Structures are given as C-alpha cells and as structure tokens.
C-alpha cells in the first residue's frame, strides 16, 4: 500500500484543524495535563471541562470547579488557558460556570471508590 503524499497529509491536517470535533478532542486530550493538586486527577477526568467553544478570535473553555471556593482555582484556570493557547495557537478564555455543581457523577467512567471520592 503506498504511503500518502506530503500534499495529502497536509490536506488531512488542514481538514482536522477546521473540524470542530477534532479540535475539541485535541484540546481535551491536552487538558489532561492540568491536574487538581488536592485530588490528584486531571480536569478532564474530573469532569470539570464542560464545553469548549471555538470563536474566530479565541477559544472559550467553559468549566466548573470541584468546590465554589476551590483554593487552586486561579492556578487551574491559568493552566487551562495556557494549555489551550498552546494547542489552538490563539487566544484562550476560561469561563467559570456556577452550574452544574460538581459531583463524582460528572467524572469520566471508572470506579470512583478507588479514587477515594465516594
């Protein structure tokens, strides 16, 4: 089977860059680097990233916190912005949402008991 030409690879990369589902997946995967130091789990696994919206001039990451007065909120928000900027190569904004309130039900699948959360 012949290998794709460099032109075909470039076209595929360009299509992925404009596909919002692929872009969101790429941002979410990168956001796994952002770990809540109190719980020692990443913001994606915890279910804190609720939505990623791509605008022409910036990317808006809409997230919640595990508690309303999370002592690490500023650090987590800054890290989410920084990682999003690196992936999208553009401006990033983080919007903190009041709802839904965080609970283990929002987490990605797994045995929550093994993480000591319930």
Image (cartoon, rainbow, N blue to C red):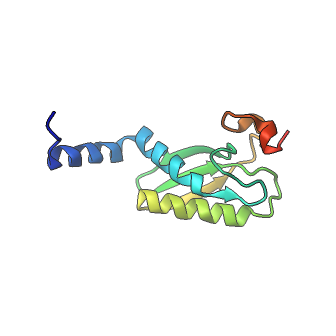
User: In this rendering, is residue 51 above or below 32?
Assistant: above
Instruction: Mark yes or no: residue 34 visible.
Output: yes
Front-most of residues 90 and 44:
44
> Can you say whether 9 is above or below 108 in the image?
below
Residue 82 in picture, x, y percent from top left: 54, 65
Is residue 57 at least partly visible in the picture?
no
Indicate the quadrant containing the N terminus: top left, top right, bottom left or bottom right. Answer: top left
Question: What residue is drawn where x is 41% and y is 61%?
Answer: 89
Q: Position of residue 70 (x, y in %)?
A: 80, 59
Q: Nearer the viewer, residue 117 or 13?
A: 117
Say whether residue 26 is left or right of residue 33: left
Front one among 116 and 22: 116
Kindly indicate the quadrant of the structure image that contains residue 88.
Answer: bottom left
> What number of labels is visible?
0
Residue 62 lies, in percent from the top left, at 61, 49
Q: Which x, y percent locates residue 96?
A: 68, 53
Residue at 52% x, 48% y is 29
Q: Residue at x 82, y 53 (%)?
A: 68
> Which residue is most to the front?
1
Q: Where does the C terminus fall, quadrant-wise?
A: top right
Q: Quadrant of residue 12?
A: top left
């Amino acid at each position: 089977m012949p290998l794709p030409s460099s032109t075909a690879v470039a076209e595929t990369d360009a299509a992925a860059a404009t596909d919002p589902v692929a872009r969101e997946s790429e941002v979410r995967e990168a956001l796994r680097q952002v770990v809540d130091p109190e719980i020692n789990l990443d913001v994606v696994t915890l279910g804190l990233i609720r939505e990623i919206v791509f605008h022409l001039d910036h990317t808006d990451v809409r997230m919640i916190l595990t508690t309303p007065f999370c002592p690490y909120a500023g650090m987590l928000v800054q890290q989410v912005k920084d990682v999003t900027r690196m992936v999208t190569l553009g401006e990033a904004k983080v919007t903190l949402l009041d709802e839904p309130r965080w609970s283990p039900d929002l987490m990605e699948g797994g045995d929550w008991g093994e993480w000591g959360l319930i």
